[in-house]
Image: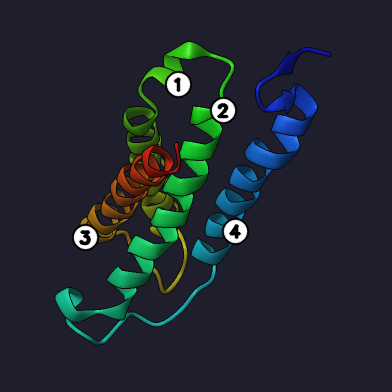
Amino acid sequence: MRRSVHGTSGERLFYYVLPLFLYMLLIFVLSSISRYPEILPWVFNLDKFIHTIEYYILGYLLMRVLVTSPRSVFTGAPAVFATIFGMLYAISDEWHQSFVPGRHASVYDILFDIVGVVLAAVTYRLVRRRGA
């Protein structure tokens, strides 16, 4: 088995890739739950803060996978790829919610999701630089 700076490919899959996919599955499952629409205005809505935190975690997990990737195309610009992937996942999540009774798709949710991913990418890089 091929060894890298981050262990074998099996170790990388278990420690880096699996948590990302499990978290994405959690987002999908939570998006499948029907609920009543929010009453508070969207700007002051706790829901938008939750979206940001939810996608901050996704962005962090994406950065871990991309930074440890054996493919240099991902390690060369992990923040860009994390942002693109996070944005596409946010769009697909909102589209999925449009089919769930009691839920709806929201451009504002996508925007706050993207903010979460971008914040994670930026802070991940800052923390890694500071620790190096």
The local secondary structure at tag 4 comes to helix
Q: Which residue is mark 4?
A: 26
Considering only order in the chain, which callout, 1 or 2, is on the residue closer to the N terminus?
2
Q: CA distance from mark 3 to mark 1?
A: 30 Å
Answer above or below: position of 26 versus 33.
above
Q: Which residue is mark 3?
A: 108
The local secondary structure at tag 1 comes to helix
- Left-right relation of 89 to 64: left
The amino acid on which the numbered mark 2 sits, given as a three-letter code, is: Thr
Q: Are marks 2 and 1 in contact (CB under 8 Å)?
A: yes
The amino acid on which the numbered mark 3 sits, given as a three-letter code, is: Tyr
The local secondary structure at tag 2 comes to loop
Q: CA distance from mark 4 to mark 1?
A: 26 Å
Front of the two marks 4 and 1 = 1
The local secondary structure at tag 3 comes to helix
- Left-right relation of 68 to 53: right
Q: How is the image coloured?
A: rainbow
Residue at 43% over, 51% down: 93
Nearest the viewer among 44 and 76 is 76
Q: Are marks 2 and 3 in contact (CB under 8 Å)?
A: no
Disc number for residue 75: 1
Q: CA distance from mark 2 to mark 3?
A: 31 Å
Considering only order in the chain, which callout, 4 or 3, is on the residue closer to the N terminus?
4
Disc number for residue 68: 2
Q: CA distance from mark 4 to mark 2?
A: 23 Å
Spot occupied by residue 23 in the image (x, y as percentages of width and height): 59, 53
